[in-house]
Amino acid sequence: MQPRTSPLDRTRLVDRSSAFLGRAWSKGWLPEPATKAEELWAIATKSFGDNASAYERAGRNEEDVADFRLRLEKLTASVVAEADLNPLGRAMAHGQLVRVIKQRLQFGALWTAKPALTETVLAPPIIIIGHMRSGTTRVHRLLAADPAHSSTRFCDSWHPVPSKLHSRRFWGGLNLTIARRLNPWIDALHPMSSGRVEEELGWLACALNHSTYQTQWHIPSYSAWSEARDAGSVYREFARILRTDAAHRNVADRPRVMKVPQFSEDLPALLAQFPDARLVVAQRDSEDVLRSAVSIVANQMTIQCDNCDLGWIEQEWQRKLDLRDARMKEALENWDGPVAYLQFTALGDDWEREITRTYQALGIELSGEALIAMKREMVGHESADHTAHAGQMAAFDQAPKD
């Protein structure tokens, strides 16, 4: 594997792929990808024909319908004006946004046929709150290992529409295979497999929340606009997707363990949908969080942009972490439900003690069966690729500075 000695390193395959696409467009071998809202909408909805309008609205109120359309306009305008994407980035942006629009209408078709899915009664969820790189993934996977709980898999998050052929796991695996070719360091940053427990980031992407896109593209105007906008429509769609997934997989009676770092920014909107939730707050030294978060964001952005500014990424993510801290603090001060706090270092020192304390704080039983499953999960965690990330960051420190 090519060593990663800078946060902005990328593979030669990325450079070759981007150069080929640019040449193919300039010579007319391939059509350039659409990036404007109206063009993307036309492409994505063509296969739905006359049903597109009905499927856009099925299961949703007019506010939620309008919110998605406005988000699409604002996001694409920001991408065009600010992102400075290379050819590979333009192709990836086109593919992601077309897929999101298609998924939205596919859900509409499903909810037209089975409207009861969006009313599925759920067990009170367990929601993990905290910054990326604060230990949320470890906590998430430990709690999800408990057989009394349910969780979302990678394939469910990024291919959320249930398939009659049960092909979601295949498509998730194919996505990861391609991602690893372009970015062989991805598992050092965040180990994934199609059928493994994963955060629900893909469901936020379905509603065009900024969290997915701001880690890939330089879109400060969209981030600022979305941060200032009420997130109610985003989390109503999120809740509909969760209820649909829980019914399809027959796990609605088991508490869903959920985690997305973006939750810390949007807690009031999230908890409005799940007022009976139990919360677990993961905490870590802010300097360590920032350094690790910048490494991840830079790794994503450099694939799709040839002119990434590491200084801007550091500044922007310091701002993001400060914003999330302030919003999380305010929301938790107004929360009177069960909540447990977990420190990153304490979890590393004695995870079993900290998990036991967490279950007690949440008022739920920690069974022997759950502990056995968690021990198996920890064996996998301790041998996982992501322990290499610390080595990468040490290499960044040793690399010659310009």
Image (cartoon, grey):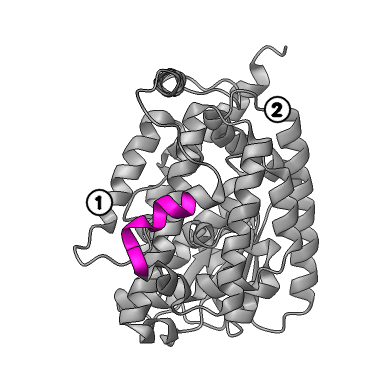
Q: Is residue 172 above or below residue 263?
A: above
Kindly indicate the quadrant of the structure image that contains residue 329. Answer: bottom right
Is 210 on the left-hand or right-hand side of 164? right
Disc 2 residue type?
Answer: Asp
Q: Is residue 111 above or below residue 143?
A: below
Disc 1 residue type?
Answer: Phe
One can see residue 184 in this view: no
Question: Which is nearer the eye, 66 or 83?
Answer: 66
Q: Residue at x 40, y 58 (%)?
A: 45
Magenta stretch: dominant secondary structure: helix
Is 386 on the left-hand or right-hand side of 319? left
Q: Is residue 55 above or below residue 321?
A: below
**Which of the two discs, 1 and 2, labels the residue nearer the N terminus?**
1
Indicate whether residue 45 is drawn in magenta. yes
Question: Which is nearer the eye, 391 or 203?
Answer: 203
- How packed mark 1 is, by other alpha carbons closer than 10 Å (few <14, some 14-19, many 20 or more), is few
One can see residue 271 in this view: yes
Q: Residue at x 72, y 11 (%)?
A: 402
Q: Is residue 224 above or below residue 341?
A: above
Q: Secondary structure at mark 1?
A: helix
**Residue ID for mark 1:** 170
Q: How far from the left and from the top, in percent, is residue 325?
A: 77, 58
- How packed mark 2 is, by other alpha carbons closer than 10 Å (few <14, some 14-19, many 20 or more), is some
Q: Residue furthest front?
A: 50
In the rendering, which numbered label is found on residue 274? none
Q: Residue at x 71, y 69 (%)?
A: 230
Q: Which region of the structure is painted magenta?
A: 40-50
How far is disc 1 from disc 2 in space, using C-alphas? 36 Å
Indicate whether residue 98 is drawn in magenta. no
In the rendering, which numbered label is found on residue 309? 2
